[in-house]
Amino acid sequence: MGEHGHGPPKGIVRWLTTTNHKDIGTMYLVFSLVMFLVGGLMALVIRSELFQPGLQLVDPAFFNQMTTMHALVMVFGAVMPATVGLANWMIPMQIGAADMALPRMNLFSFWLLAFAFLLLLSTLFIPGGAPAAGWTLYPPLVLQTGQAFPMAIFAIHLMGASSIMGAINVIVTIVNMRAPGMTLLKMPLFSWSWLITAYLLIAVMPVFAGGVTMLLTDYYFHTSFFNAAGGGDPVLFQHVFWFFGHPEVYIMILPAFGIVSEVIATFSRKPIFGYEAMVYAIASIAFLSFIVWAHHMFTVGMPLAGQLFFTLSTMLIAVPTGVKIFNWTATMWRGSISFEPPMLFALAFLFLFTIGGFSGLMLAIAPADFQYHDTYFVVAHFHYVLVPGAVFGIMAAVYYWLPKWTGHMYDMALAKWHFWLSAIFVNVLFFPQHYLGLAGMPRRIPDYALQFTEWNMVSTIGAFGFGLSQLLFVWLIVKCVKGGERATAGVWDYQHGLEWTVPSPAPYHTFEKAPEVR
Amino acid sequence: MAHAEQTHDASQYYFPHGSRLPFFGSIALFVLMAGAAATLNGAAIGGWVLGLGLVLLATLFFLWFGEVIRENQAGLYNEQVDRSFRMGMMWFIFSEVMFFAAFFGALFYARQLSVAWLGGEGAKAVTSLLWPDFEAGWPSNGPGALGPREDGSYEIIPAFGLPALNTALLLTSGLTLTIAHHALKSGHRGVLKLFLALTFALGFVFLGVQIYEYGHAWRDLGLQLGTGIYGSTFFMLTGFHGLHVLVGAIMLVVIWLRSLAGHFTPRQHFAFEAVAWYWHFVDVVWLGLFIFVYWI
C-alpha cells in the first residue's frame, strides 16, 4: 500500500493486492476458464450416465448434484466472470480511462467471487454432498438439502455481493471516466452492452439474495414464505427466482451481443450498421427482461390473463433481437469479409444463437409450453443460447483481443481447428436434445425409456467431442501467452476503437493522460 | 506522472496502487459465512468461527474506511473521484431498494394472492380443498394456524401505539439531519454537532423501542417468526429494516466523530451526504413498513 512503482510487484503478492484493471481482468478470465473446465467435467458425468438407459455410473443423488452444480458453476463461475473479465480489460481501454473508477472494490469483487466458489464447491466433499434440487432451488424440494444448504445459500450471497460491486464499478467507470469527447453515443457497443448489463445486475441480484434468504429462514427459523400451511406459497419462490432469473440470462448474453457487434464490424471492414438502433435494441431487451419472467412457470397454473400477458411480452423480445440479427447481417452486406477465428465464432453465434432464439419463441407460447415444459427441448433451447450463444461470444472476444493482451499472435490453424470442432460437436451435442424433448424425455432424470437411447448416445458423443476440443483452446492460450509472432498495435486490418491505438501487449498503464476523441 | 501520495497532482484521478484489504476482506466474509453455515448445521465450533468472522469484518471496515479517510484528508481526491464515490453510493442504495423490494413483493403476494387462494378465491381455488374450513383474511397465520400457541391464536401490534411513535422518531431524525446538513453548509459547526448527535440518538431510541416491541410480540402476543406468513413478513421486513437502522446509526456516529475532528468543510463533505442519503432511504423504507405492515 505504501510503495508506488509503475510495474506490478513480483510473485503471488501481485495477484493478491493488485488494483490494476488488466491484472484483475486476467484473474477473472483465468478463473472463468478453470470453472468452465470444472463445470464441463460435471456435464460429462451427466452425459456419461445418459449414454445408455438404466443406471450405469453414478447414483441418482449424485446425478442430481451434478446437474445442479453444473448449472451454478457455468452460470456464476464461467460465463459471468468471463464477461466481467472482458469488461475489466476492455472498458477502460475502449472509453479512454486509465483504470476502473473504484479499483479497490474491483479487486474485492474478484476475490469475493473466488471465495464464494470455495464455499460452494466444498459442498461436494461434505456428508450428504452438494445441493441437488436444481440451480433454480425450488422449494419444497430444496428444503430437503442437507448440510450443503446454508453453504450454498451463503455462497450465493457472496456471489451476489461480488456481482453488485462489479456492476457498480462498471456503471461508475462508464458514466464518470470517459475521455473528453467520448460521448455515450460514440462508445463501442461492447461497453454499451456492459453498461446495460450492469444495470440489470444491480436491479436483480438483490432480489435473488432476498429470495434465497427467505429459503434460509423457512429452513431454519420457521418462517412460512413458501409453506401453504402458514399462508405462504411455494410458487412465490418461483416468481422471485425468475424475476431475477430472466434478466440473468440477458446478463449472460448482452455482453456477447456487444462482442459480436465489434467482431463482425472489424472483419467485414465496415462500421456496424445501425449503431444507434443497436444501442436502443439492447436497452429494449433489458427493459422487456423485467416483464417476462413468468414464461418459465406457465405450468404452475396461472390465470388466463397472466398466460396471455407473459406469452405476448416474451414474443416482443423477438423484435429488438431481430433488429440486432438484421443489423449484424447488414453490416456484412457488401463488406470485405475475412474469416479469422473471431469472425468464425461470431458467425457461428449468429446462426446458432438464432436457433436458440427460435426455440425460445416456441417455448413462449403458453399452450405449446405445456408440452415442452421440463423436457430436453428446454435443455436444448437454453444450451443453444448459452453455449453457441454466450460462450461462443466470449471465445470470439478472446480470439479478438488475445493479441492485444499478450502481444503475440496465436496459432491461427489451431484456432480454426478449435472453432470447427467446437461448432460441429456443439450441434451434435445439443441438436438431438430437441428431438428427445419433443418426444417427451424429461430433464434432470438419470434414467430414460428405451426409445430415447439413440439420440442420447449421439448427444453424449457430441459432449465428449466438444469437451475435448476445449483442451485445444487451453493449449492455444498457453502457447500464445508464452510466445508467438509479435502483434502490431492494430492487430487486425480494420480497426475501430481506442484499444487499437495502444501497443500490443497493452502496457500496464494505459491512457494515464486521456486521449483525444473526435 | 507522479503517483506517490505526497506529490499527487490534484488534476489527476487518484488510483490506489495495490491494496491488501480486498483479499483480507474476502477472507473475513468467507470466515463469517462459513461460520454462519456451520452454526446452522449445529457444529459446536460454528459460533466461534462466526464470531471470528464478525471481528475480521469489523476490522476490515475500520481499516478500509480509515484508508479512504486518510487519502481524502491528504487531498488526493479531486472532483472526479468525488463523483465516482457519489455514483457508487447511489447505485448501492438502489441495490438495497431492490433487496427490500423482494420482501415487499412477498408481502403483497401473500396478502393479495396466496392467502386469498387458500381461502377459495380465483384461479387457484383448488388449493382451498386442502383446508376447506379456512377463511382468508389479513393478518393471517395460514390455514394451519401456525404459531407458538396451542390454539393458533396470536395478536398483532396496533399501528397507532409504539409504531406510530417510531414513525415520529424516524421522521424527526430525518429533520434533525437536514438541519445538521444546512448548518454544515453554512459553517455553523456547533449546530452541526448538536443536531447530528440528536439524529443518531433518535436512531438508537428507535432501535430500543423496536427491541422492546419485538420482546413484547415474541413473549406476550404469540407473534413470532413462526406465526405463519404474517409473522414471517412482519419480522423479516422490520428486522432487515432495523438492521439497516443500526448500520445507519453507526455511520452517523462515525460522521459525528469526524465532524468533531473537523473533517468536513462547507463545500466538501461527501461522507456526510452519503450517510444522509442512506438515512433518508432507511426512513422511506420505514414509511412503507408503517403503512403496509402495521397500518392497512
Image: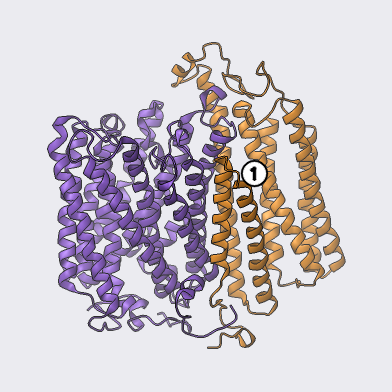
Residue A514 visible, this orientation: yes
Q: Position of residue A291 (x, y in %)?
A: 42, 42
Q: Position of residue B295 (x, y in %)?
A: 70, 31
Residue furthest front as drawn: B44
Q: In this rendered view, identify the residue nearer to me: A285 or A93.
A: A93
Classify the position of the C terminus of chain B by image quarter. top right
Identity of the residue drawn at 80% across and 69% down: B186
Give the letter of the chain under mark 1: B
| B128, above or below A491, in the image | above
The quadrant where residue A482 appears:
bottom left
Identity of the residue drawn at 18% across and 70% down: A340
Crowding at mark 1 (Cα within 10 Å: few <14, some 14-19, many 20+): some
Identity of the residue drawn at 80% across and 59% down: B196
| A475, above or below A278, in the image | below
Q: Position of residue A111 (x, y in %)?
A: 49, 63
| A382, above or below A9, in the image | above
Q: Colour of chain B?
A: orange
Q: Is residue B209 left or right of residue B16?
A: right
Residue furthest left as drawn: A454
Identity of the residue drawn at 62% across and 71% down: B82
The quadrant where residue A91 appears:
bottom left
Residue with the mark numbered 1: B240
Q: Position of residue A150 (x, y in %)?
A: 51, 43
Per the image, label 1 sits on a secondary structure element best described as helix
Which amino acid type is marked by label 1? Answer: Phe
Q: In this rendered view, identify the residue nearer to me: A312 or B157.
A: B157
Q: Is residue B268 left or right of residue B204?
A: left
Residue furthest top as drawn: B133
Residue A273 visible, this orientation: no
The quadrant where residue A21 appears:
bottom left
Q: Colour of chain A?
A: purple
